[in-house]
Each structure stands twice: as structure tokens, then as C-alpha cells.
Image (cartoon, rainbow, N blue to C red):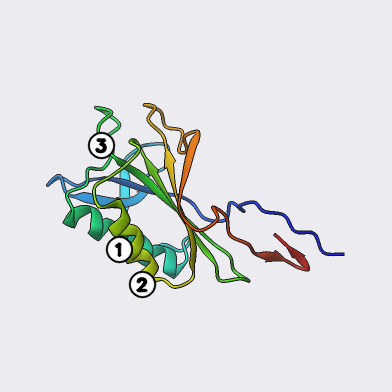
Amino acid sequence: MEWRIHFIIEIKRFIQFGKDKKEKAKFGVFANRTHEIIEFEECKIQTKISQEIAKLVLEFINKNNISVYDEKNNKGIFRHIIIKYGFKTDEIMCVFVLAEDRFKNEEKLVSLILDKFKNVKTIVKNINKKNTNVILGDKNIILYGDGYIEDKLRRIQI
């Protein structure tokens, strides 16, 4: 008997967006016990494809002048991107964590990701409007796909 369970395994960390000294969007991870963003070219806890997707999103944000969230003044749109990867199924889920319900050229970004990364199975917006260090908000909006990916752990399909 095979069990089918639909849920997300928390394998990868989120990628934080912020601004550099020239006010241009950047991404990275928080320095230990701070909210200072450490940029990276290569990250050992992220898959290569996750890093490629994050770079594409960052380029899109900068090219389209989409604001990134600033915790100090509670302004901006893009907070984080979370990329889940199914190691056995090769399926990818992208979650944009936003401080607003929509962003400029949203459909274009979805199309761009789907054109370049054929194994992206779902793209979701998570809305977090609170001035908090909690990553995810309570509201999810599916932009593409079913809102979940599947993978296998040993003989169990999840």
C-alpha cells in the first residue's frame, strides 16, 4: 500500500531580499543573530537551480524597479523567496513572500520563470504585511500550478 501525502518538506532555507548601499536590490541570507544580509555567489545549502531562480528574480526586480522590503521603515514589496526542490521528482515550487498583494509585472515574472525552468510545477505568493521577523504570512495565492510539489522518501510518495 502506498501513502500519498501532499505537503512541503522544509529542506531549503529562504532567501532574503534587501538593498545595497546604492539602494539596488540584493539577496542573501541573514548574518547570524542579525538582519544584516550577507550576499552570496554560491550557497552550499541551496541547490544550484534554486540559486539560478533567485538570481533571475533579483534581475527582474532590479530591471522593473520593484521595491524590496525594508524592516526599518516597513516599506517595500519583495521580502523573501523560498524555493523547494523535490530531489526524486525534480519538481520545483517557488514562493514569493510579499508585503503587498500584487507587484508590477507579476505575470511577466511567472512567465519568465516557467520559460526558463521547465520543472517548476507551482508558483505561490505568500502575503506577509506585518512588521515582524516571521517569514511567512497567513495568506497564500497560487499563481501557477496546484500549490504543492511531490517527492519520495524511500518508498513513500509525498
Indicate which label's residue lies in the foreground, 1 or 2: 2
**Which residue is at a point 35% across and 59% down the rendered structure image?**
110
Indicate which label's residue lies in the foreground, 3 or 2: 2
CB contact under 8 Å: marks 1 and 3: no
Q: Residues within 10 Å of mark 2 (few under 14, many from 20)?
A: few
Q: Position of residue 12 (x, y in %)?
A: 52, 55
Which label's residue is closer to the chain start, 1 or 3? 1
Q: Position of residue 102 (x, y in %)?
A: 32, 42
Which label's residue is closer to the chain start, 1 or 2? 1
Q: Quadrant of the N terminus?
A: bottom right
Residue 75, above or below 120: above
Task: Inspect this view and state whether residue 53 appears.
Answer: yes
Judge left or right: residue 142 versus residue 76.
Answer: right
Q: Identify the disc placed on residue 76.
A: 3
Q: Amino acid at mark 2?
A: Lys
Q: Amino acid at mark 1?
A: Leu
Residue 45, above or below 76: below
**Which residue is at a point 23% across and 60% down the rendered structure image?**
59
Residue linked to disc 1: 56
Q: Amino acid at mark 3?
A: Gly
Q: Secondary structure at mark 3?
A: loop
Q: Identify the disc placed on residue 116.
A: 2
- The Cα atoms of the two marked residues, 3 and 2, are separated by 27 Å
